[in-house]
Image (cartoon, rainbow, N blue to C red):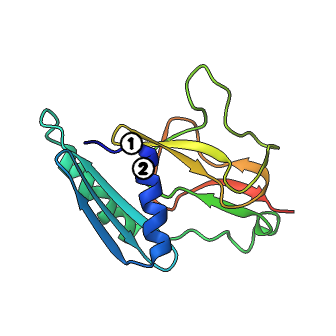
């Protein structure tokens, strides 16, 4: 039995709402650990793949980088940027602005977004995670190039909430 990304996303939301600090789920082919804190939810997903030996090393990488990744506040001297909300990456992976190479970007500068709208996709270990906006407003800046690697908590977009 394998889990699709929607089931995993629902599990993450459920755990975050439940108030549990950590949940581990192990099945034959998948091992999932979800840790929640007061402001962030960290998820590590390991899919068993016998032909890929490096997979366990990649699975441990999120735990190492989350502790060293500083939270990047908007600099106070950037008065123009101070009024904007930063949409940050919830996971480590590869940032994609479109659902497929032949499709249009999810959002561009000037796009009006609502809470829950998909703003990009981040691919991590062959799983494509749709990143939904937690704010409504207008995209004023795209901070990451398409197909670029991103870190946990890295700023992706600036949104004008007004």
Q: Residues within 10 Å of mark 2 (few under 14, many from 20)?
A: few
Q: Can the viewer see residue 98 in this picture?
A: yes
Question: Taking 44 as reference, is 67 above or below it?
Answer: below
Residue 86: x, y in percent?
Answer: 67, 61
Q: Position of residue 140 (x, y in %)?
A: 78, 50
Marks 1/2 in contact by CB < 8 Å: the verdict is yes
Q: Is residue 70 visible?
A: no
Look at the picture and state if 19 lies above or below 49. Answer: below
Residue highlighted by disc 2: 7
For image coordinates 52% across by 70% down, the residue present is 71
Q: Residue furthest front?
A: 1
Q: Which residue is mark 1?
A: 4
Q: Say what secondary structure mark 1 lies in.
A: loop
Does dot 2 land on a helix, a strand or a loop?
helix
x, y percent for residue 76: 72, 75
Please identify the residue farthest to the right as the structure is shown.
162
**Looking at the image, which is closer to me, 33 or 91?**
33
């Amino acid at each position: 039995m394998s889990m699709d990304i929607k089931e995993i996303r629902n599990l993450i939301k459920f755990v975050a709402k439940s108030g549990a600090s950590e949940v581990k789920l192990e099945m034959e082919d998948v091992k999932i650990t979800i840790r929640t804190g007061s402001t962030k939810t960290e998820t590590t997903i390991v899919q068993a793949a016998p032909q890929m030996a490096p997979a366990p090393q990649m699975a441990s990488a999120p735990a190492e980088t989350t502790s060293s990744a500083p939270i990047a506040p908007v600099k106070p001297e950037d008065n123009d940027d101070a009024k904007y909300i930063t949409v940050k990456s919830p996971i480590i992976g590869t940032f994609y602005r479109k659902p497929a190479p032949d499709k249009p970007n999810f959002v561009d500068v000037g796009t009006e977004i609502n809470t829950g709208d998909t703003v990009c996709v981040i691919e991590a270990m062959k799983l494509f995670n749709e990143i939904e906006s937690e704010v409504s407003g207008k995209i004023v800046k795209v901070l990451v190039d398409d197909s670029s690697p991103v870190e946990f908590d890295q700023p992706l977009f600036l949104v004008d909430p007004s």
